[in-house]
Image: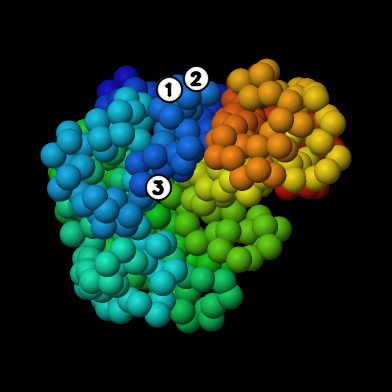
Amino acid sequence: MALFDCTVDATSGHARALTYETAHGSFQTPMFMPVGTAATVKGVMVDTLYDLKSQVVLANTYHLSQRPGESVVAEAGGVHRFMNYDGPMLTDSGGFQIFSLADTRKLDADGVTFRSIYDGSYVRWTPEENMRIQMELGADIAMQLDQCAPYPATREFVQAAMELSANWARRCLAAHTREDQTLFGIVQGGMHLDLRLESVRRLRQIGEESVAAGHKDFGGFGIGGYSVGEEHDLMFETLGEVARALPENKPRYLMGVGNPTTLVRAVREGVDMFDCVLPTRTARMGTAFSSTGRMNMRNAKYTHDFGPLDAQCSCPVCRQYSRSYIRHLVKSNEMLGGILLSIHNLHFLLDLMRRAREAVLADAYEDFYQEWMNSPSAKDY
């Protein structure tokens, strides 16, 4: 396969199984990406990520550009060498972080000025500057700079954010020149189907015009602006039609979603890739994912429970440690508790998507979906 080739290995209903080639190897979908915001998946060593068969790690442009700075990462040889991870990586543009800090940023058509959470200094980003930073960081996949509208928001606000994001997508694609890195465009439009489909139309047109001019197309597409406060059922009123409006031969990445049931439902609608801090953040709070639902490991009922976290799980934590011991670690505020739960929760989502792929390859995704939706855990996520 050539660099950034995408192969559709199988479909089952709207669910898809893809293989995507990057400079650091191929990855297969459906898949979940652990979040390593500051070039580290919190508490999880790189060797453990390999053992868990993690395929792509996500890092964040906003945070890395502020600390230690993209020039330091570039001097180290790029984000892969900086964190000693040799698999495919993706950098989020940092747009979500900027626009979540509404009281410390100023937006205009040309770019955005924001105040750093690290030292209070003011930073100016245009789409071109954001591309320069992401090219220096050197992940395999970069994301365009976009404006993520909050929920709720007026239609007028959401439409303006969609239009700005489309204009910035054009500028990002024109400015992105690194050959061993691809760029994903991002669909916006809030909960409005017509605005979402217009965003897709504009992104496809931008890519086609770029190719006609002898330049690059988008290598895939993020679907942003969901999971920003709305009920997930509201998201699913439009998600499927939006996903299926995107090109069939490019990955579709639902950004910032890590709820297991939501992943299973979204794959059924044609989504391929996911990321979220949920499995590791909830782990640090003492919560374990399991085949029977979420488990609060602070609960006293686990004090004398010497069984594994999840009897159906094959992760190294479930093979070696008891519920009682993990509860002891969590209650004692021992860092190992959060580490073990992070490993287990990541394995849970990675394995869930592995099994989803197997179901697509067997053209049995609907059976897989119904089995999950009727399981004890489905309503607990």
Quick check: marks 1 and 2 in contact, CB under 8 Å? yes
In this rendering, the answer to whether 57 lies above or below 105 is: above
Residue at 59% across, 32% down = 340
Quick check: marks 3 and 2 in contact, CB under 8 Å? no
SS label for mark 1: helix
Residue at which label 2 appears: 51
Give the residue type at disc 1.
Answer: Asp
Q: How is the image coloured?
A: rainbow
Neighbours of disc 3 within 10 Å: few (<14), some (14-19), many (20+): some
The image position of residue 332, as x and y in percent, is 65, 43
Whether residue 74 is visible, yes or no, is yes
Neighbours of disc 1 within 10 Å: few (<14), some (14-19), many (20+): few
Q: Which mark identifies residue 47?
A: 1
Residue at 44% across, 57% down = 187
Residue at 80% across, 45% down = 299
Give the residue type at disc 2.
Answer: Asp
Quadrant (top left/top right/bottom left/bottom right) for the N terminus: top left
